[in-house]
Image: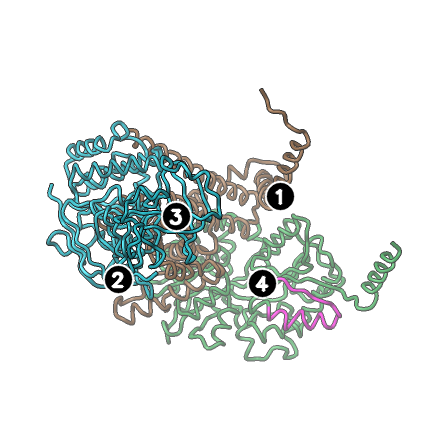
Chain colours: A brown, B green, C cyan
Amino acid sequence: MTAIVDPALAADARRERRFFLSLSLPALFIVGLAAILPILWIIRQSFLTTGGEYTVGNYEKVLSSGLTWSALLTTLELSLGTLVICILLGTPLALALASARPRVANLLMAFVMLPLWTSILVRTYGWLVLLRRDGLINAALTGSGLTAEPLPLVYNFTGTLIGMVHYMLPLFLLPVYAAMRDIDANLVRAAASMGATLGHVIRTVILPLSAGGIFSGSMIVFIYTIGFFITPAVLGGGKVNPLSIRIERTLSTFQDWGSASVLGILLLVLMALIGVMFLAARRLMARNKVGAAHA
Amino acid sequence: MSWLRISLAAIAVSAALPVYAQTVTITTAGGDYGNAMKEAMWAPAAKELGYDVREETQSDGLAALKMQVTAGTVTTDIIHLGSPEGAQAAAQSLLEPLDYKIIDPNSVPAGAKSDYCYPFDSYGTVMSWNTKAFDENPPKTWAEFWDVAKFSGRRALRANAQDLIEIALLSDGVAPADVYPVLSTPEGLARAIKRLEAIKPNVSVWWTSGAQSAQLLKDGEADLVVTWNGRAQTVKADGGAVDYTFKGSVIGTDCLGVPKGAPNKEAAMKLIAAMTQPARVAKLTDFIAYGPVNPAAYEGGLIPEDRLKTLATAPENAGTSVFSNADWWVKNGEAAQKAFDEMMNR
Amino acid sequence: MKSLPITIDSVSKAYGAYVALDDVSLDVQAGEFLTLLGPSGSGKTTLLMALAGFVRPDSGKLLLGDRDVTRLAPNKRDIGIVFQNYALFPHMSVLANVEYPLALRKTPKAEARQRALDTLARVKLEGLSERNIAALSGGQRQRVALARAIVFEPRVMLMDEPLSALDKNLRETMQYEIRRLHDDLGITTIYVTHDQREALTMSDRVAVMNSGRIQQIDTPQRIYDRPSTRFVAEFMGEANIVPPGSVRRVDGADASRETVMIRAESLHLDAKLVGRNGVALEGILRAKAFRGENWLLTLALDGGQEVLVCIPAALAGGCAELVVGQRVTAYAPAEKVHAIPGAIA
């Protein structure tokens, strides 16, 4: 037996749903305009010659060039390197923040977030001042006699990595910190009462329970860094050439929009692939967890 | 209704009538160079013509030009380019032909003439060094620049094949006059690339902007820097421990073009003609050591005698130089850059 | 397994101006079940956490047996703890949770598994060992928490309001089971609750706390019938604090000159039920309420003081006819009239 529905009330319900749906329209419009249209335009460009005829030549040219693949390799090296350092530095930092008293944690958090409020260009040049041969760090190192010669800290892979880690660390930290802060303090107490040392607690309780946050943070780091341009351009000294720089060069030196578009699509595909891989891995992890519990 | 019409009419009249001025937009590279162009060249010219000039800056003029023209949204009327880029832009039909009825055709020496991008100043790509690293005895030739055993020290080169290909051949013993003939042989480019690869381990920075090269010199981050003479001169004049030589420099010119479909084409031609008057391009050397192309600027003492030796095109400096060949670069630029990029990635 | 006595000696703890523990001393005998009872903020949980090692006292000593544990790290104290919200590891199965303390003690795998399974059987969770924690009911989680706290055979057990999240019926079942488990194992247990009925039901002794101090330590019966302070009297059930002069003897003899406590359920409407040496209170009926097993009457004494009278339904023949506003006399037997030392009404 079906309940009798007053048509006027049903219409009200529909109108309400439509109203809330309509709230998303401005955002959808902007996303469509700012994200989807340019991508479609880039896809079209990638099939055009300089003269404007349709061709697949751009793809042949880009995909057969060793420069593309070495740039891809550099991109992955930078992203993976940044990710590993972010995990190594960010996880203990998040733990410290999550276990600090709220007032101290807020203060520390403000310090961590400070870089996010500064222009990336300013920060990158800031690193230049710190890291160059007569920069503050090398001056301290040689001045104190720790090293005889200034260390090559910038205009290379190391410098680029430092700049990228500095940019990404707060973004990695946020989800990890959130995950750790949400861990019930009584779980830690319970573990300790049963005899767990700090190391045990971290290994058996905190890390497993913040794995989701570490995962999200890693995904953010990876996907963000794939497209990094300014940091390798300023701190790489021309020796670190990921896909983003390859795109810029293809555009500025050759005005080859077709090839640049192909490279852009390659970057996009790479991001999508990594996103899919992360999501698949997360699903796998979730299934394994259930599986282990039922084993 | 009628009130609205009357108000609109009033606005239209007030906009059209009294304070109308021709607006022209110029795009430069900005920085010290852009400033110098403003002070010496276009600001006084705009005043004379009664134009209202708006400045945009773009570190990569050609890319910006192409973006504007292909997207059909040309906002700039005059664009400042390097001559090779100018030639490239012309080949891709991104520029309006210059109107030599408005611009004086005799202001450009025959060899430098262009139908699309008006060359107005010149610079040399030169060898510069930190005087603290090599006080009395810097390298004197490109061959010595390549001699890392005798002249140790960190090098900084531009991350671009342009000029470096020519310099690499000079370092390998090729005479200035033979550089382009050698480059036009099948193995010429490979020979230049091989030379660059030989010095690559001693290059600590491959710079990407002129400002960066000046910074490297000033900070002592690199001891031997291939840069533009204007940049080296500015650092030296500011008291930096820097010197440079025009010996073996590669001379290039910068030019002004009018983008295809520029909104104020005729005013742009007039402004180009006015801002490149001999006195104004001579005045540019007050700010930056880029020598005028117009021979008339060297006459009548417009440029002080002692400054002449800081200019790449000054007669006494021109002997050992190579004039950059825009045509060669338009034809072979992509292949040269690709070979260069591959060398960088090895 | 030998359980240990617990000695709490002059322990104080302040958070800024707020005094959580004010010179608390307490001896718990080996194998005893002692309950810390008090309202929230009374210091009972702070005291428990100090014993567990998660709160560092400002002064005083804590001893387990002869061992001074005041400065010992929590993970070295060998205390089983059951937390208010169970604190089970959500990323581990039931079995893994219970094996956890054994794994930390490097117990051989097979033995650890057997002991965990035995303990789960003891708390009636056979067959659930592979479940996820999220798939358990509140009562089941409580049992896992218990199993995890006893599996490593601690000699002292602390429980922090372990039943507060359960519904009433389940709570009563678990009260019985926890007590049975305690009797089986003989572990010295300190149990924290704010539920006086739970404290009375389960404990060998009850320590009532308020404002960081222990008000009274005694058997449940004495705490209930012979409260030593007005706070204890009022905290434990419906207590009437009656000032001198409001009470008269049934037989006309002089009544006590002290402030007395009479529990609501000790009062009757029938003088015959209390004997000649009982006392009588007279006042106007202000309100009456039927509560199923009993009636609750509110009388206003002549001095203005309100008194609650609780009449079991079986003895409340006349209650339904009472009219608000009429004069009523209530009676209490002499042994149920308890003078509160030093109290001023």
Q: Is residue B99 left or right of residue C275?
A: right
x, y percent for residue C243: 35, 58
Judge depth for marks 4 and 1 and give the one in front: 1
Is tag 3's residue or tag 2's residue first in the polypeptide sequence?
A: 2
Judge depth for marks 1 and 2 and give the one in front: 2
Under mark 3, the amino acid is Thr
Residue C22's label in the rendered image is: 2
Task: Locate the N terminus of chain A and report the quarter of the image it occupies.
Answer: top right
Q: Is residue C38 left or right of residue C31?
A: right
Q: What is the quadrant of residue A100 in the picture?
A: bottom left
Judge depth for marks 3 and 2 and give the one in front: 3
Determine the chain carrying the residue at label 1.
A
Kind of element beneath mark 1: loop
Residue B49 among magenta residues: yes
Q: Are marks 4 and 3 on the same chain?
A: no
Real-space Cα separation, disc 4 to disc 3, in angstroms: 104 Å
Kind of element beneath mark 4: loop
Under mark 1, the amino acid is Leu
Q: What is the quadrant of residue C41 in the picture?
A: bottom left
x, y percent for residue B97: 71, 55
x, y percent for residue C93: 29, 34
Which residue is under mark 4?
B29
Residue furthest to the right in view is B2
Residue A23's label in the rendered image is: 1
Q: Which of C184 and A176 lies nearest the eye of the viewer?
A: C184
What residue span does the magenta drawing correspond to? B35-57
Residue C329's label in the rendered image is: 3
Q: Are marks 3 and 1 on the same chain?
A: no
